[in-house]
Amino acid sequence: MTEDATATTVVVAVDGSQAATNALRWAIGEAAGRQAALRIVYAAGDDDLPAGDIRRAFDAAERSLRFATDVVTEVGKSVAVETEILWGPVSAVLIHESRTATLLCVGAVGADGHPGEVMGTTAAALAENAYCPVSIIRGPRVGPAGGVDWIVVAVNDRPDNDAVIECTLNEARLRHAPVLAVGVGAEDLGETTYQELDRRIEKWKLRNPDIRIHGVACMGSVGQYLQSHATESVQLAVLGGNDVDQIAYLVWPHNQSAAPRGERSILIVPHPVTVGAESAV
């Protein structure tokens, strides 16, 4: 899957829920930072319902879109806004939107457990099938009063990792946030692997002197690393499309007393993806 490098639209799906409003507020900041248009869509579902049900669905959609535009006004950032009601299966219409979007933002809902339950079935489907990066927003978040509030990314040898790193650096620049680059591998990690991690991080620092980048190495996955470092404050974790199995670890730590629920949002970068005309990595 590829992202249209000329696209300049951030798409957010709303439905009147608090989860969708959280995603909308995130999307407003993304659109303003990227100088992109903000496209607010309501996926109303199938249009082959009885006439009365279609009327009720249409009314609910209009109310949600009016509320969404009020939120944009309240936030007060200068963004061009368009709204649209879309008909069809929710996941399908949002995947279609992702074909021409720079970024797609959705709220995360659900209970503890399987990634599909943690995020909600729509967000899970988008994480695996979207054509552009997808932000899955867990909830309203206030950063720590002191200390570091990281954007976390896994560093590995997968073909899509450079694109994932590039998206991470773009987000860090937009949010004036530091990057925690977690080098992941098997239990037989050797000295060469650590040296390679250091080499890659030094290259990113040279090309992105405005971003603070710190590297750590671990045996296992980035999710397992954060499980064992649950007190780290993480505002966003960036994953490649092949790493969606890590979502449950990242957004719902087992040590819930150390890392409150709902704080870590996720950015999924599909594979392959073209993030920009020039590589930052």
Image (cartoon, rainbow, N blue to C red):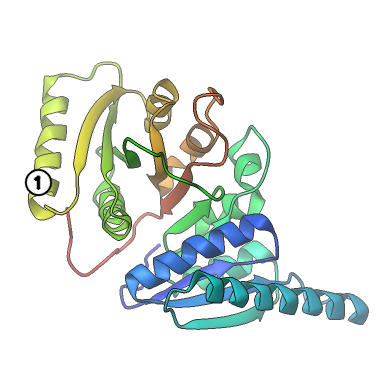
- In the rendered image, the residue lying farthest to the front is 145
42 on left or right of 208: right
Residue drawn at (70%, 65%), measured in percent from left and top? 16
The residue under label 1 is which amino acid type? Lys
x, y percent for residue 12: 54, 67
How many numbered callouts? 1
Residue occupying image coordinates x 53% and y 72%:
97
Instruction: Tell me if mark 1 has few (under 14), some (14-19) or many (20+) residues whose alpha carbon lies within 10 angstroms of its own.
Output: few
Residue indicated by mark 1: 203
Res 102 seen here: no
Whether residue 115 is visible, yes or no, is yes
- Secondary structure, mark 1, is helix
Which residue is depicted at the point 70% across and 76% down?
A: 87
Image quarter in which the N terminus is found: bottom left
Location of residue 164 with respect to 90 vertically, above or below: above
Can you give x and y, in whole percent of width and height, for residue 10 in the image? Answer: 45, 71
Residue 235 locus on image (x, y percent): 41, 44
Quadrant in the rendering for residue 49: bottom right
200 vs 47, left or right, is left
Q: Position of residue 221 (x, y in %)?
A: 37, 29
Q: Quadrant of residue 190?
A: top left
